[in-house]
Image (tube, rainbow, N blue to C red):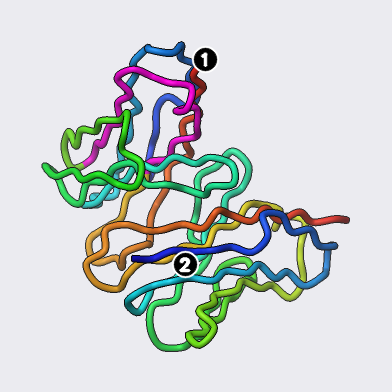
């Protein structure tokens, strides 16, 4: 079974500041890990994913995330926040084999202050 | 290329009324999903269809039924709506060969049950 915990339902940063959104997962098998972004009144879109190989993965819009097995974490970062990054972000996990389902965290709403 | 299309986008129902949410994808995807999104709870899987002709329950199936009409279409029916079903509903699909979790989402259907 898999589960995801996102630390902080709301995060607020200043424009140009570092963005850090935290995600911890639980999985009985090696996981696939994902970050999705949801802009207001839209559906979710894939931001980045970790499957195998390099543990630091890069996504769209300058975001990246690092898979740390020892810490069961997959935190999302961006060096310099932009106003357009304001959205809700969801971390998600699925099992590598045989899974048809994706388990989502509760989401973190990111606000960017000018 | 429209991707995943959901109708209607908005609906208000009275308790006890029935309705069907429609979803169609034009990407030749095999698997389709229905999620509901509630504040602070992320996305929860209602039902999914791994392939045409099959459907399976997700995390929160009670009060819902689904039909995989063909490869393109996957509908969600509320037989007797309840206020607890007020939510935003998302349909999603995943293509053959894609790893589990790379979902394409529709823009959502916002349902209010009075």
Crowding at label 1, few (<14), some or many (≥20) Cα neighbours within 10 Å? some
**Is any part of residue B1 visible from this angle?**
no
Q: In this view, does A109 lie above or below B61?
A: below
Which chain is indicated by disc 1?
B
Task: Please name the residue that numbered disc 1 is placed on.
Answer: B114
- Find the magenta span and give its range: B72-91
Q: Residue at x 50, y 55 (%)?
A: A45
Q: Residue at x 32, y 28 (%)?
A: B63
Q: Which one is nearer the viewer's eye here, A40 or B65?
A: B65
- Is residue A51 part of the magenta span, yes or no? no
Q: Position of residue B99 (x, y in %)?
A: 31, 68
Q: Residue at x 30, y 55 (%)?
A: B94
**SS for callout 1:** loop
Q: In this view, does A23 lie above or below B1?
A: below
Q: Residue furthest right?
A: A114
**Is any part of residue A46 visible from this angle?**
yes
Closer to the eye: label 1 or 2: 1
Q: Residue at x 30, y 26 (%)?
A: B77
Which chain is indicated by disc 2?
A
Task: Please name the residue that numbered disc 2 is placed on.
Answer: A34
Q: Is residue A17 above or below residue B25?
A: below
Q: Position of residue B113 (x, y in %)?
A: 49, 19
Q: Where is residue B81 in the image (x, y as percent from the top left)?
A: 39, 19
Q: Where is residue B45 in the image (x, y as percent from the top left)?
A: 37, 46
Q: Is residue B35 above or below residue B81?
A: below
């Amino acid at each position: 079974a898999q589960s995801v915990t996102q630390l902080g339902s709301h995060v607020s940063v200043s424009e140009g500041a570092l963005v850090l959104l935290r995600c911890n997962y639980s999985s009985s098998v090696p996981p696939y890990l994902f970050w999705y972004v949801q802009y207001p009144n839209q559906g979710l879109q894939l931001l980045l994913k970790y499957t195998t190989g390099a543990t630091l993965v890069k996504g769209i819009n300058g975001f990246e995330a690092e898979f740390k097995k020892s810490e069961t974490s997959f935190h999302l970062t961006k060096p310099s926040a932009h106003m357009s990054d304001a959205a809700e972000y969801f971390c998600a996990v699925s099992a590598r084999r045989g899974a048809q389902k994706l388990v989502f965290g509760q989401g973190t709403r990111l606000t960017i202050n000018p | 290329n429209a991707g995943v299309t959901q109708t209607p986008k908005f609906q208000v129902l009275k308790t006890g009324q029935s309705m069907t949410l429609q979803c169609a994808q034009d990407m030749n995807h095999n698997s389709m999903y229905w999620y509901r999104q509630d504040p602070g709870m992320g996305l929860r899987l209602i039902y999914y269809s791994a392939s045409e002709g099959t459907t399976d329950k997700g995390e929160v199936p009670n009060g819902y039924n689904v039909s995989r009409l063909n490869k393109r279409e996957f509908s969600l029916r509320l037989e007797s709506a309840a206020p607890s079903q007020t939510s935003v509903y998302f349909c999603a699909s995943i293509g053959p060969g894609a790893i589990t979790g790379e979902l394409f989402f529709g823009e959502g259907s916002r349902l209010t049950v009075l």
